[in-house]
Amino acid sequence: PERSRETASLYEHCAHALDLAIARTGGDGLPLILGGDWNDGMNRVGERGLGTSVWLGWFLLKTLRDFTPVAKDRGDRKRATAWSKHADRLKKALEQEGWDGEWYRRGTFDDGTPLGSRLSDECRIDSIAQSWAVLSGEGDPQRAAQALDKAMEFLVDDDLRIARLFTPPFEHSEKEPGYIKSYPPGVRENGGQYTHAATWLVAALAESGRADDAWRVFSMLNPVNHALDREAADLYRVEPYVVAADIYSVGERAGRGGWTWYTGSAGWLYRVAVENILGLRRQGDRLVIAPALPSSWDGFRILLKLGEAEYRIEVRRGPEAGIEVDGKSGDHIALHNNGTHTVIVTTA
């Protein structure tokens, strides 16, 4: 490979990517899946250039909404207008073509056959299409809530303590989704727990205000909880002190950990713990704390160090929500260059 002679700013790189994603729109108004989207194992779903992806639709819609103001700020009105119009069209397509009646489909094959549908013989419901209906902030609220209900019903297994990527696994289907089908049923992406996706389910539950469900699924993803006694450790078979990319879900392998030391899933697990459950986020020159507090918790404490400043934060339940910083009530938590600051956040 050679280094390209074409150069561009970071903004132009991002803009080119969005323009290309819009150009790759299928006949149903959804993004083409081509050789695979997030799930690269589904590399034959759209190999003829006609299959589409509902998940990628939610992801693209979120990105377009977030990036349009950036284009406006840079004076790129042409792109800002085009992106905003496409986002509106995409949102309609997701609800018209992506909704399956009880949850959102995963996409369509080249011939238009739905993927991730109640009509599918395998892969009837896929986790990430449901999670991103919420995480995009764009899904119809009632539908998105129902989609999460169905994800919890069909994908979360309390006995194995896993959250499957989809169910049932690919095995005998006449449709060829790609190399994902070469994995045994319940292994890795083929219907096992794929932890990266499972963390998105936790985030979606937390963002929907379902704190107990978020904590329940997060506890399943915590590897320590798969080795609390000898019997559990013998079943899990891998290190309980690092995150596994996947946990098997079918037959004699069910409950066994797969590829461990997986940094992508570990990073997401950390983010959902800090940002979605504890609700701690940095936004510009301020801290935001909006926790999804499980009913079994009275509150929690955080010691946060940012540069030369230290924040001693206590979150607790109370009759009225409020923020107190260094003894003074306010509506936000400003960041400082130094010093120790005491923060009390009361959540109703």
Image (cartoon, rainbow, N blue to C red):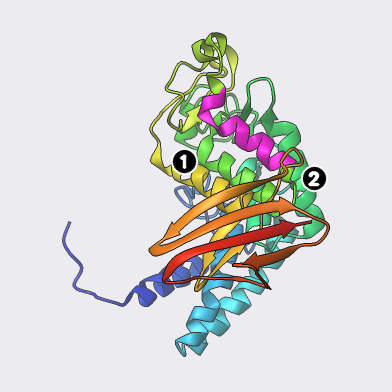
Q: Which residue is mark 1?
A: 265
Residue 24 appears in the rendering: no
Residue for point 60% across, 78% down? 84
Q: Which residue is mark 2?
A: 102
Numbered tag placed on residue 67 in the rendering: none
Q: Is residue 214 shown in magenta?
A: yes
Callout 1, which amino acid?
Answer: Ser
Q: Along the horizontal axis of the image, is 339 left or right of 113?
A: left
Q: Position of residue 256 (x, y in %)?
A: 51, 19
Up-down relation of residue 239 to residue 231 (above or below)? below
- Whichever of labels 1 and 2 marks the residue nearer the N terminus, that label is 2
Residue for point 72% across, 58% down? 346
Q: Along the horizontal axis of the image, is 223 left or right of 337?
A: right
**Secondary-structure class at tag 2:** loop
Please tell me which residue lies in front, 339 or 21. 339
Please tell me which residue lies in front, 227 or 304. 304
Q: Within the image, what quadrant is residue 142 found in?
A: bottom right
Q: Within the image, what quadrant is residue 250 found in?
A: top right
Which region shows up in magenta? Answer: 212-225
**Outermost residue to the front:** 327
Q: Along the horizontal axis of the image, is 111 left or right of 297?
A: left
The quadrant the N terminus occupies is: bottom left
